[in-house]
Amino acid sequence: MRATHYIATYERRAANYTLRTELFYKKYYDLVKTAPALNNNGTGYARGAELFWRDKKTIKNADYWVSYSFLDTKRDYLNYPREVQPDFAAKHTASFVYKQFFSKISTNVGVTYSFATGRPYYNPNRPVSEFMSDRTKTFNTLGVTANYLTTVGKAFTVFVLSVSNVAGQKQLYGYRYSSDGLRRDAIRPMTPSFFFVGMFMSFGTDRRQEVIDNN
């Protein structure tokens, strides 16, 4: 399998700001196909744009960033009858992260919102002309985090609480059909929400900001 990539990136960094944009085009050759027989006649492409903006200065004691990605991609590989949007690709994805530090209580509180448009999935009841034409519903999720900064002995310490999908959205990744196509089961996350409670300690070097940035 082969791929040719063309990527143009612009990035500007300052003490409290980061701006990054990217345009890309990728062409795929000799992709593996499994139908009607095993061969390397598959093709495909991906093109799109990405934007990232981070600001640590405008709002006092706050840090926020926004990211957006547009993806137009089609592939003719595996058992696909022609070039179509694959099931792992969402055309639009975006996220927003906001973190506020409360110095009086040495606590950082953050929220994260993620969005993605529906992805195609295979429905065996559709004719070949409508292959991968069904779409999942849009993906929406909201998460919250809280970080308490302190010291334990000589160790720089952060106590972390993180909860994903606090609104309890019923995420859908696609469907799994029976062999006769008459029954289907929704493909969903193993758990609707994820809870994490932890303690991070660093000795000698204060790495608490790294913990906050990664949670």
Image (cartoon, rainbow, N blue to C red):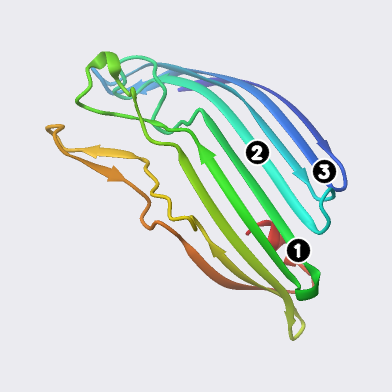
User: With respect to residue 154, does 45 lie above or below?
Assistant: above
Image coordinates for residue 110, horizontal then vertical, percent: 65, 58
| 179 lies left or right of 110 | left
- Tell me the crowding category of disc 2: few under 14, some 14 to 19, or many 20 or more residues within 10 angstroms, Cα based: some
What amino acid type should be assigned to the residue bearing mark 2? Ser
Q: CA distance from mark 1 to mark 3?
A: 17 Å
Please tell me whether mark 1 sits on a helix, a strand or a loop: strand
Q: What percent of the width, then of the height, locates residue 67?
A: 65, 38
For label 3, the residue is: 17
Residue indicated by mark 2:
67
Q: Residue at x 25, y 39 (%)?
A: 176
Q: Would you identify the image quadrant in which residue 19 lies?
A: top right
- Estimate the x, y position of residue 103 in percent, counting from the top left: 80, 70
Farthest residue toward the bottom? 153
Using the rendered image of the protein, determine whether residue 134 is visible from the camera's viewpoint: yes
Q: Which of pointers 1 and 3 lies earlier in the amino acid sequence?
A: 3
Would residue 91 be found to the left or right of residue 158 on screen? Answer: left
Q: What residue appears at the point 52 percent right and 67 percent down from the top-left corner? A: 196
- Cα distance between the residues tagged 3 and 2: 14 Å
Which numbered dot is residue 69? none
Tell me the CA gap for discs 1 and 2. Answer: 21 Å
Report whether 99 appears left or right of 14: left
Q: Residue at x 38, y 58 (%)?
A: 191
Circle nearer the N terminus (1, 2): 2
Residue 101: give its label. 1
Quarter occupied by residue 133: top left
Q: Is label 1 in contact with label 3 (beta carbons under 8 Å)?
A: no
Q: Amino acid at mark 3?
A: Tyr
Residue 137 screen position, x and y as percent: 40, 36
Q: Nearer the viewer, mark 1 or mark 2?
A: 1
> Looking at the image, is 15 positioned above or below residue 73?
below
Above-or-below relation of 156 to 19: below
